[in-house]
Amino acid sequence: MLYNLEPDRSVTGGAWYSEQEFESEFVEVLNQQCHRFLIKKLTVAKDTSAGDPLLEKNASFASSKEVWEFIKKLGISKVQLSVEDIEMILSTLIYDGKVEKTVVCGSGSGLSSSSRSASSGEDLVNLYRAVEPLIDSTGLMRIPCGTCPVIDNCYEGGAVSPSTCQYFKKWLSEGFDENGTFEDVF
């Protein structure tokens, strides 16, 4: 490769790869910070909406550009992130059930660079907001066995058993969070 050429992001893996290694910790930190920003926005919306549910919902949305600006101000990334990179992170939060997305016609201010032109000539803007779970998880999902990938092979006297399970021992000895869920199981 020529020294004066910068390879395309599709070749290098983009912001999520460093020296051909996937940066899972970096992605996790970005996930947490994006979610934290949207949770804070939701909390402020609840406090200022005076009990109006529609006002609360509308005030809790943030554009991908707003989230990008928040991440940029934090200075947690050595890599130059784009709005599209932040939208990828926000998509993972959608799949995790922590965030919802809506698309609205924008007025031209604060639009993300990935906005597309609508047929009427207006821009479409992706808006995101944190969502609270409708119901708590079941008791089985709160213990390590509920999410264990080898539970079918788990029996007393076997290679995998409750008496030798490191996650079960750790769960019994420490790690409950404020919701009664085990922290850092897998």
Image: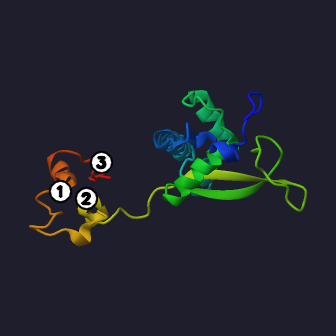
Q: Residue 165 shows which numbered tag?
A: 1
> Which quadrant is the N terminus positioned in?
top right
Closer to us: 156 or 84 = 156
Q: Earlier in the sequence, mark 2 or mark 3?
A: 2
What secondary structure is found at the residue carrying circle 3?
A: loop
Specify the amino acid type for callout 3. Answer: Glu
- Which residue does the image show at 62% across and 45% down from the upper left? 13
What secondary structure is found at the residue carrying circle 2?
A: helix
Residue where numbered disc 3 is placed: 183
* Residue 124 position within the rendered picture, expressed as x and y whole percent measured from the top left: 78, 55
* Residue 39 position within the rendered picture, expressed as x and y whole percent measured from the top left: 50, 45
Q: Determine contact: label 2, label 1, CB under 8 Å.
A: yes
- Which residue does the image show at 83% across and 47% down from the upper left? 107
What secondary structure is found at the residue carrying circle 1?
A: loop
Q: Residue 184 shows which numbered tag?
A: none
* Residue 62 position within the rendered picture, expressed as x and y whole percent measured from the top left: 64, 46
Q: Residues within 10 Å of mark 2 (few under 14, many from 20)?
A: many
Q: Is residue 61 above or below residue 151?
A: above
The answer, for residue 43, to whether it is visible in the render is no
Specify the amino acid type for callout 1. Answer: Cys
Q: Earlier in the sequence, mark 1 or mark 3?
A: 1
- The span from disc 2 to disc 1 (Cα, nearest Å) is 9 Å
- Which residue does the image show at 27% across and 66% down from the upper left? 150
Q: Residue 144 shows which numbered tag?
A: 2
Closer to us: 16 or 31 = 16
Closer to us: 3 or 61 = 3
The answer, for residue 58, to whether it is visible in the render is yes
* Residue 28 position within the rendered picture, expressed as x and y whole percent measured from the top left: 47, 43
Q: Residues within 10 Å of mark 3 (few under 14, many from 20)?
A: some
From the image, state whether disc 1 or disc 3 is nearer to you: 1
- The span from disc 1 to disc 3 (Cα, nearest Å) is 16 Å
